[in-house]
Amino acid sequence: MPFHPKPLDLDRLFDDCLFLLAHRLRANNIKIVKKYASDLPSVRVDRSQMEQVFINLLNNAIDSIHRNGEIKIEMDPKNREKISGVEIKIADNGEGIAEELLPKIFNPFFTTKKPSKGTGLGLSISKAIIQRHGGKISAASKIGKGTIFNIFLPLNHEA
């Protein structure tokens, strides 16, 4: 897959993804709570690939919530291991993922969805895209409480 990273404002990119999913969010009565730091730097990313990651994570959150829930999105500049970047948190108050299944969620073809609802490729592809950008993704979850995905993207990664 072609890789064309360019400096982008992740908050704008995320807002574009939310716009694409606005109908689905409204139809399921899901509230979006955004907390973007005012001093977010631009990050070198491939727009279409990062859009794929954000839309996948949002769709998973919507599927998990079903109706009348909330998705929180936070973005902050951070330093990890002396590397400057942006940390993104996507948290939902959906059904959550069982603790014993959490280590498997990034494996190809692993899914907690019903057979006709997912292939189990979304998270493994998302992880590969984030790693290609020099970043990291992790997840935490509690049954009945929801799931939080944490993404760290470095500012100046060259693939």
Image (tube, rainbow, N blue to C red):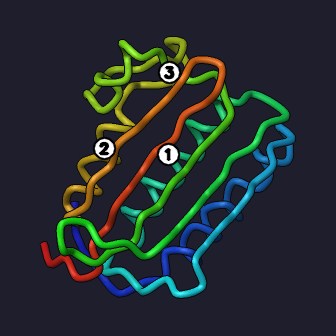
Query: Could you tell me if residue 46 is visible in this image?
Result: no
The kind of secondary structure element at disc 1 is helix
The kind of secondary structure element at disc 3 is loop
Asked whether the residues under the numbered discs 1 and 2 touch, taking CB atoms below 8 Å apart as contact, a structural biologist would say yes
Mark 1 Cα shell of 10 Å, populated few (<14), some (14-19), many (≥20): some
Q: Nearer the viewer, residue 12 or 82?
A: 82
Instruction: Please indicate whether residue 154 sits to the left or right of residue 111 in the image.
Output: left
Counting from the top left corner in percent of width and height, residue 122 is at 40, 38
Quadrant position of residue 123 = top left
Asked whether the residues under the numbered discs 1 and 3 touch, taking CB atoms below 8 Å apart as contact, a structural biologist would say no
Quadrant including the C terminus: bottom left
CA separation, marks 2 and 3?
A: 19 Å
Counting from the top left corner in percent of width and height, residue 4 is at 26, 77
In the rendered image, which residue does mark 2 sit on?
Answer: 125
The kind of secondary structure element at disc 2 is helix
Number of the label disc, if any, that sits on residue 97 = 3
The residue under label 3 is which amino acid type?
Ile
Number of the label disc, if any, that sits on residue 75 = none
Front: mark 2 or 3: 3
Quadrant position of residue 24 = top right
Residue at point 35%, 33% (across, down)? 121
The residue under label 1 is which amino acid type?
Asn
Reply above or below: 80 against 107: below
Counting from the top left corner in percent of width and height, residue 97 is at 50, 21
Mark closest to the chain's N terminus, 1 or 2: 1
In the rendered image, which residue does mark 1 sit on?
Answer: 56
CA separation, marks 1 and 2?
A: 9 Å
Q: Nearer the viewer, residue 120 or 136?
A: 136
